[in-house]
Structure formats: structure tokens, C-alpha cells
Image: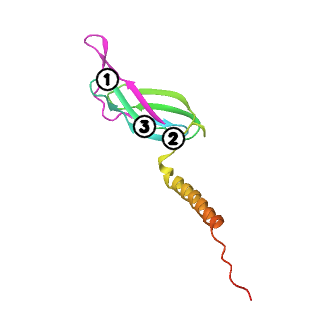
């Protein structure tokens, strides 16, 4: 299961008195945490969108209530803190794909064993019975 996290960062422009998108951060981090950070990764600026940072990552395959945490504290900047709570529920046993590509050796083993059993049974049951002379 993959997840895409995106955040918009704005800076206050004192000359105009408005908030404008800001893409000057190069060390913004995202923590995907339950009790401990399971995933800590950098948020990268999205090309073509000023002020938008984004990351794509694979969610751990376990049940739980996780948090997306962005906690940016640097001298000279206002602290940025954002946390969003999300439940994570992995797929049930019947929601996975029918055939897994990593399991092809097991499929081949089961098929070859079945074919071998059918051939052995056919040869065993259809073979001639040779009787020797008894004196």
C-alpha cells in the first residue's frame, strides 16, 4: 500500500501583507509514526507548484493508528508543526491479488508434482503384468 503526503507552505510577505507560497526549504522532514517513527523521509518540492512539498512511500503492513508529523524548527523561521492522525488497516487475506509473482516457484512445484502423480498412476495402472514360469 503506497501513500502520498502533500503539504502547502506559505510565507508572510510584510510588504503586501499577504501569505505567498514558499519553496525555499530543502530540509523539511515527514515522520510517519505510531509510537516510534516507522518512516522518516524528506519532503521534496513539487516541480511546477510553488510552495507544495510531497513524498510517496510504502505504508508498513501492520494495524494501528499512525500520525503524519511535520515538525520544522529552525532559527530565523516560525516553527511549523502539523500532525494528522490516520488509521492503517492492511488488506485482509482475501483482498490480496490472486496470484503472486514471487510464488511462481511454489506454483511450478505443485503443478509438476500433480503431473508426476498422474503419469506415475497411469504407468502403474496401465503397465503389463509379467509372469514368470513357476516350476
Q: Earlier in the sequence, mark 2 or mark 1?
A: 1
Give the secondary structure at mark 1: loop
Question: Which of 73 and 114 lies nearest the eye of the viewer?
Answer: 114
What scheme was used to colour the molecule? rainbow
Residue 62 x, y percent position in the rendering: 57, 40
Residue at the spot of label 1: 51
Residue 27 on the magenta span: yes
Give above or below for 120 relative to 1.
below
Q: In the picture, residue 115 is in which quadrant?
A: bottom right
User: Which residue does the image show at 66% across and 73% down from the upper left?
Assistant: 129
| Residue 79 in sight here | no
Pair 3/1: label in front: 3
Residue 70 on the magenta span: no
Q: Are marks 2 and 1 in contact (CB under 8 Å)?
A: no
Residue 2 x, y percent position in the rendering: 45, 35
Residue at the spot of label 2: 60
How far, Cα to Cα, is label 2 from label 1?
Answer: 28 Å
In the picture, which quadrant includes the C terminus?
A: bottom right
> Which span is picked out in magenta?
1-29
User: Which residue does the image show at 34% across and 25% down from the upper left?
Assistant: 52
Residue 57 x, y percent position in the rendering: 42, 37
Question: Which of 60 and 19 lies nearest the eye of the viewer?
Answer: 60
Give the secondary structure at mark 2: loop
How crowded pointer 3 is (Cα within 10 Å; few <14, some 14-19, many 20+) is rated as some
Amino acid at each position: 500500500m503506497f501513500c502520498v503526503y502533500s503539504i502547502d507552505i506559505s510565507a508572510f510577505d510584510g510588504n503586501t501583507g499577504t501569505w505567498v507560497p514558499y519553496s525555499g526549504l530543502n530540509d523539511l522532514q515527514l515522520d510517519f509514526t505510531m509510537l516510534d517513527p516507522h518512516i522518516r523521509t524528506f519532503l521534496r518540492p513539487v516541480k511546477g507548484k510553488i510552495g507544495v512539498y510531497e513524498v510517496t512511500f510504502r505504508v508498513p503492513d501492520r494495524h494501528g493508528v499512525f500520525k503524519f508529523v511535520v515538525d520544522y524548527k529552525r532559527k530565523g523561521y516560525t516553527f511549523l508543526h502539523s500532525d494528522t492522525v490516520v488509521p492503517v488497516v492492511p488488506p485482509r487475506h482475501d483482498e490480496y491479488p490472486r496470484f503472486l509473482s514471487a510464488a511462481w516457484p511454489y506454483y511450478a512445484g505443485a503443478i509438476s508434482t500433480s503431473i508426476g502423480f498422474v503419469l506415475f498412476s497411469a504407468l502403474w495402472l496401465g503397465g503389463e503384468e509379467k509372469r514368470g514360469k513357476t516350476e
